[in-house]
Structure formats: C-alpha cells, structure tokens
Amino acid sequence: MLKVAMIGCGGIGYYHLGHLKQYGDIIELVGMCDIISEKAEEYAEEVGCKAYTDYKAMLDDAKPEAVFICVPPDCHGEIENDLIDRNIPFFVEKPLALDIALAKQIEKRILEKNLITAVGFQCRYDSLAEHVKAFAEKNTVPFIDCTRFGGVPEQEWWKVKERSGGQLVEQTVHQLDYIRYAFGEPDTVFSMAARGYVTDIEGFDTDDLSATVVRFENGTLATIATGCYAKSGDCFDSKFIFSAPDKRGEMHLLSKFEIFGEVEQEKEDGFLISGDGGMGGASDEGTVIQNSVDAGLVCDRTFLEAVISGDGSKIRSPYSDGLKSVAFGLACNKSMETGLPVKISEFLK
C-alpha cells in the first residue's frame, strides 16, 4: 500500500480527500498537515490518521511515499524543494507558484531527479477532452472565445492579487490549460484589467474583470474574458467557443461539448452512437456530448498509480507541462501591469 499524506487542509484539500478516501485498495493515508491544528485534526479524524502542524515533522514521522500539496498560491517553494530533497513524488494544486523563476527552479530539480509529479488540472481527464482534441485536429480553428464569470470565493487570500495571482491565474488557469491541451501553445498575449465593480467586500484588492487577446503559435486568435463581479448565473454564460469556417464547437467545462454544423451519420432513436458506445443527444441545435466521468477522481488516481508503477506516462499534466499553463496566466498579468503585449517565450526565459 502506498503511504500518502496531505499538506494543506482547506477547501481544495477536502476535494482531494474525498477522492483519496475511495482508494483504500491502493493507498494508506498516513498524515494530514495544516498550520491551523483544528483543520488538520478534522481531516485526520475523518480518515483515521495522525494530524500535524509542521509538514517537516510529518515527513520525518509518517514517512509518506507521495504527498498532495494543497496550499494557497503564495505558499509554494519550500515545500516542493523539501519533497524533492527527499525524493518524494508529489501532486501540487495550481497555480504552482506566482513567481515564474521559482516555478522554473522547482521544475529543473524535478527533471534532474526524474521525479513523478502531477498538477491539479483535472479538467484534462474528463470524457470530453478526446472529442475537443479531435475537433481541433479535423478542423481549422481560426478563432477561440473563452469566458469564465463568477463571484468572489470565501478564502481571505483569494481577494488579494498579490497572494492569489488574481482570478485569471487562480481560477481561469483551468481554461487556459484546456485550450493549450486541445489547441496548442500560446505565442503572445495582451491583457487589460478593470476594477471598481466589486464594492461590497472588505479588503478586496484584485481585478474585477480582465480581457485578453491571444495569438497562438499556429496562428489562431483567441479572446479570454474572466470576471468575479457576478451576483447570478445570468451574468454571463461561461464557456468555450471554437470557431471553424463551417462549424463551431461549444464546451462548458466538465459538462458538455456541443458541435453545430456537423452532420452525423449514425443515429439511433435520436441519439448519436459513438465508437466507444457512448451516447450524446442529437438535436436540431447541435450534437451534444455529455461528460460522463468524475475528472478529479480519475486525475488523482492516475497520479497515485503512476507512483506505484514508477511510470508517469499516463499523467496528462506533470509539473513541466502545468508550468506552461501557469506561465500563460502570469504572462497575462505581466501584460496588465505593463500595458504591453507579452511574448510567452520571452517571459519564460
């Protein structure tokens, strides 16, 4: 049984804990750590292991063979380096770090030790990814429109951009990552931000809204807009639109992918039958493919099985790849700060 521990017992930690509790066939949970003792104790009591407030003490005492890092964006660096020193594989939540130089230093050490790692870009593991990638491969896609709108999370650190990186880097990085995964690498970004629409939250010090224009290496252009001023789901429809000359694909993350303008041949009682036996409703409005898996569950288990086998090839977002998605977002932040376009390759130097 693989000995697994967690550092950071907040909201995202509990998300992963819900998955880890289902893997009793392959893992043993040996430690839960948080600087707030009550949180660590609550998590530890739920799964029957020991609680810690000092992660180094946990590493010495519990001797985990894999660790989930679930700390706020501004708390990365020392933890990762200590795990690398001990040759402990780790799963780290996005956005990895807010300092690109720090993330690159961690990446270099990971590669030198050939350490198995994974990043919390679980959306890549949904059942829609293969269909979106197929759409990208079969069609020329000159334009992508991406939107994500919502409210302000309750975490105190989130509302301060210096600590969270802002909504684009902390939340909408999932969208940035998915576009990279399906359509390729960004070349240049130009971003602008706006404030003044969120007025009812004490200590709020981040962008209410940002809008970005992206040119990808393959020539595709994209617009990416994200805002945290929403008071209702009616504010904006958060989704991707992938525009080809004769059709388009629309995707709601972890929910559904709908293709407009594509004639499907195989139908049975109003349903499209795919090669793997999956079904999506076929209507006059479009062919709908529904997500059929818990992507987070698949993502976490893939990492654990990779550690057990020593083969990380099935991990869809190891640290080096996750770093590229975070660099995408941080480059947008740099453009907001300078008022100038930012070339990704230059930003990563």
Image (tube, rainbow, N blue to C red):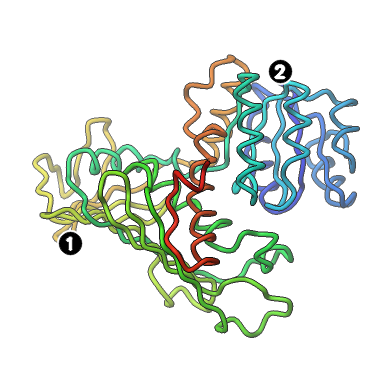
- Residue 209 position within the rendered picture, expressed as x and y whole percent measured from the top left: 50, 73
Q: Secondary structure at mark 2?
A: loop
* Nearer-the-camera pick, 210 or 171: 210
Drawn side of residue 282 relative to residue 222, left or right: left
Q: Secondary structure at mark 1?
A: loop
- Residue 108 position within the rendered picture, expressed as x and y whole percent measured from the top left: 62, 29
Does 190 appear above or below 119? below
- Residue 97 position within the rendered picture, expressed as x and y whole percent measured from the top left: 65, 47
Mark 2: few, some, or many residues within 10 Å (few <14, many ≥20)?
A: few
Q: Which residue is mark 1?
A: 285
* Mark pair 2, 1: CA separation: 49 Å
Drawn side of residue 283 relative to residue 105, left or right: left
Q: Residue furthest toward the top?
A: 309
Quadrant of the rendered structure where residue 201 is? bottom right
Q: Amino acid at mark 1?
A: Glu
Does 129 appear above or below 330? above
Q: Amino acid at mark 2?
A: Met
Image disc number at residue 1: 2
* Nearer-the-camera pick, 46 or 236: 236
